[in-house]
Structure formats: C-alpha cells, structure tokens
Image (tube, helix red, strand yellow):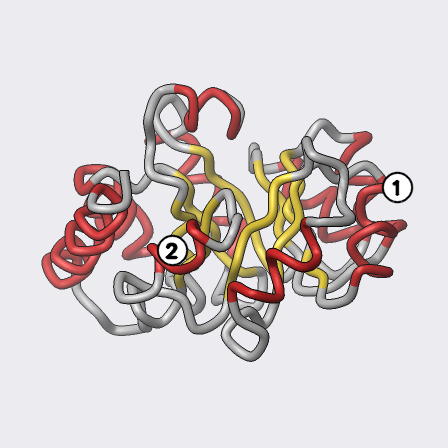
Amino acid sequence: MTLDDLLAEGAPPICAILRGLRPEEAIDISAALVEAGIRILEVPLNSPDPLRSIGAMQAEFGDRALIGGGTVLSVEAAEGLHGVGGRIMVTPNTDPQVIARGAELGLELLPGFMTPSEAFAAIKAGARRIKLFPAARLGPAYVKAVKDVLPRDVGVWAVGGTGADTIGEWLAGGCEGIGVGSALYRPGDGATLIRERAMELVAAWRRTL
C-alpha cells in the first residue's frame, strides 16, 4: 500500500504523529486512529522502543494503514525502520544521504524542509513529497510562494502547529496534507480520547471537500 493508493481511496490526507508512543499501547492507539479514519501513522524514533511499536502496528494494520517512523536522522535508522516493515519515512530535516537511502529501500519519503534550497535538495535526493516544518511559524502563504517554483508533481505537507482548526487553511494554501502531533496524541492519552480527537480532525477535513 502506498500513500498514493490511500489518497486515491479517499483517505484523509492526515498523518498522525505519535511521539512518545509506548509499545504496550501501540495497538490500541492505532486501532482508535484507524477506526476514526486516519490511516497514516508515524512513530518518531525518539519514542520508547519505536521499532517494536512500528513492527507490531505493521503486523496488525499494515493492510489498512501506511505505518512508519519519524525523526529518522541517519542511514542506519532508515535501514532499521525498513527492517521492521515500516513503509513511510519522515524526517525533520533535509539530509540527502538519508533521503536517498530511504528511496533505495522503497520507503515512502516525507523529508522536512524550510527553505526552497532544502526543498530542491530533498527532491534531487528522491523525494516526491516534502513537509514544511515547523509550519505554523511560516503559514499557508509561505507554502503558496514555495509551490510556485516547485515541480508540479511534488506534494507539500505541513507539520508543526497543525490541527482541526487549521487544516482548511493549509489545504487551501496548496498543501496536499498535514501531520498532526500533540493536537492529536500526547503520551498518556487513552484510546477513547484519541478516537474523539481523530474523529474531530477527520470531520474538519471533510468540511473542506
């Protein structure tokens, strides 16, 4: 399953960023998100035992969701992510070596950028999608300006300060999707609360259609 497949099926263009997720709660939290309609799940690699969580989530939900890791900062981390079955690799920065290795491994790539130079470096290394991070500091108008010079087939996602109250602004500004972290999940939050937030977020997306 690819990100293109999910979006073509009508899945919300929302990536749940589960920073701090613990392996023992990974299945319950993932189930809450998938049931609410969010089918792109990212466990940042600075979470507790992240590869164990990703492997378990992939085994349980890999036929319904695109699951992978974030805060991937090295070639070795990309290889570890691939080794447990992760399908999407998200980075906070633009490291051409890491991006290129992720592409070689067949991972879906969503590297972080802030400047046009970083965006083009990520694209040259093999990325078809890039994420503006931290997005809230720059705003949707910045996305519009950057997209004027990017190849038309490159998707831009916004991460950092995004949520149900701003998804419409980001999509109207030209973003293909958004990643949502603390507005959706914080360590210690239970599955019921996560499901409610996810449903609210999906509803906000539907209002933009």
Residue 203 spot, x, y in % from top left: 17, 48
Residue drawn at x 56%, y 37% as measured from the top left: 86
Vertical placement of 137 versus 69: above or below? below
* Left or right of 46 on screen, residue 153: right
Image quarter in which the C terminus is found: top left
Residue bearing mark 1:
124
Vertical placement of 41 versus 143: above or below? above
Q: Disc 2 on helix, strand or loop? A: helix
Kind of residue indicated by mark 1: Lys
* Left or right of 133 on screen, residue 140: left
Name the quadrant containing residue 144.
bottom right
Name the quadrant containing residue 65.
top left
Name the mark on residue 73.
none
Kind of residue indicated by mark 2: Pro
CA neighbours of label 2 inside 10 A, class few (<14), some (14 to 19), many (20+): some
* Left or right of 101 on screen, residue 4: left
Residue 106 spot, x, y in % from top left: 71, 27
**Alpha carbon separation for disc pair 2 and 1:** 35 Å
Residue bearing mark 2:
23
Residue drawn at x 35%, y 57% as measured from the top left: 167
55 and 166: which is toward the camera: 166
Residue drawn at x 66%, y 49% as measured from the top left: 130
64 and 171: which is toward the camera: 171
